[in-house]
Amino acid sequence: MDAFYASVEQRDDPSLRGKPVVVAWRGARSVVCAASYEARKFGVRSAMPAVRAERLCPQAIFVPPDFTRYKAVSKHVREIFARHTDLIEPLSLDEAYLDVTHTLTHMPSATATAEAIRTAIREETQLTASAGVAPNKFLAKIASDWNKPDGLFVIRPHQVDAFLAPLPVGRLPGVGKVMEAKLAELGVSTVADLRALGPAYLEQRFGRWGRRLHELAHGIDDHPVQSERPTMQISAEDTFEHDLRLAELEPHIRRLAEKAWAGYERERATEHGRIARTVVLKLKTHDFRILTRSLTPPEPPDSLARLADLACALRERVELPSRTRYRLVGVGLSGFVDPDRLPGQHDLFA
């Protein structure tokens, strides 16, 4: 979906159309949830601090997010997807992978399917979506961004090598700023440069990730579309109005543990009923440094009280000075396994 949250706001309030809209609460602790294309011209982007967005675009109209409405629209869009295929892998409220190798509508091509979906979204929601059509997931993701907004871009199998060669290596999934800098030290700035290094050298230099880089450089991605991805983590976090010291965080950790536990119980109530083995504590310092501490106890946490106690105890593993202040804290559960894969319990009595 194109600038999804902002586009929903502009659709529902005609006075916002054509204007720079920023979906965010105002305030020093708020971040941008979405920005309309009019706001993006000023450099406003998602996840940017709201105060910076206001500096970049003083005339921006700030609208508080309404996730109930966004979720309703997202559900409608997914219903449109489901008319064409059962193989849908949601990534977020506004993005998904679809495998249309075999469709329910028997359309002649993936391109025709994408066009039909985009048309239905436009007619039924009065919103626009962009689509990428390609032989695999990572290429489709790149293609979906190519002609935004309201665009369609197709990469056919015989076009893959030529399409990828001139791209900056930063366009490959998993190549962030750190990896981009490491590759730059090797004289690599484009995918073509990366290919020239060869698989053996890349694997020697970067291990298994080097082998993966070689595959991506040649457009190889065998990951299937997973219509039901297993839960990896359940968490809750909060940004404080005022920075707090570590010793002051306990009531907030326990409050967030309650939210995380409620999500975990909903997950346990599903047919999968997977069990979390690891407790995670996330902290963000006043200067935006992110810390995570985790613990996998011998027995998985079996109650809210146990989760909260473990999360609070993880503060002892934070090595920063006691005067350090924190702007955010989060509590999570991860390390999900099926119940039958839990290690067997030892007898309590010999």
Image (cartoon, helix red, strand yellow):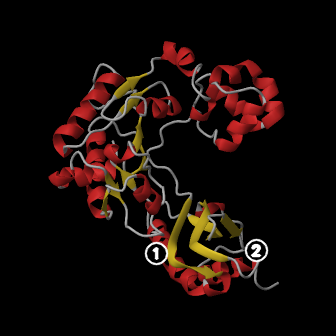
Residue 177's place in the image compared with 230, above or below, is above
Crowdedness of circle 1 by 10 Å Cα count: few (<14), some, many (20+)? some
Crowdedness of circle 2 by 10 Å Cα count: few (<14), some, many (20+)? few
Residue 322's place in the image compared with 118, above or below, is below
Left or right position of 171 against 188: left
- The answer to which image quadrant residue 197 occupies is top right
Which of disc 1 and disc 2 is earlier in sequence? 1
- The answer to which image quadrant residue 311 occupies is bottom right
Labelled disc at residue 78 = none
Q: Which residue is mark 2?
A: 320
Residue 98: in sight, yes or no? yes
Residue 271: in sight, yes or no? no
Task: Identify which amino acid the numbered label 1 is placed on.
Answer: Ala
Task: Identify which amino acid the numbered label 2 is placed on.
Answer: Leu
| Coordinates of residue 219 in the picture (x, y in percent) | 58, 24
Tag 2, which secondary structure?
A: loop
Q: Residue at x 33, y 20 (%)?
A: 109
Tag 1, which secondary structure?
A: helix
| Coordinates of residue 261 in the picture (x, y in percent) | 51, 75
Residue 32's place in the image compared with 102, above or below, is below
**Residue sitting nearer the eye, 138 or 8:** 8
| Coordinates of residue 147 in the picture (x, y in percent) | 38, 29
Q: Which residue is mark 1?
A: 262
Left or right position of 346 against 303: right
**Quadrant that contains the C terminus:** bottom right
Q: Residue at x 71, y 38 (%)?
A: 181
**Residue sitting nearer the eye, 310 or 246:** 246
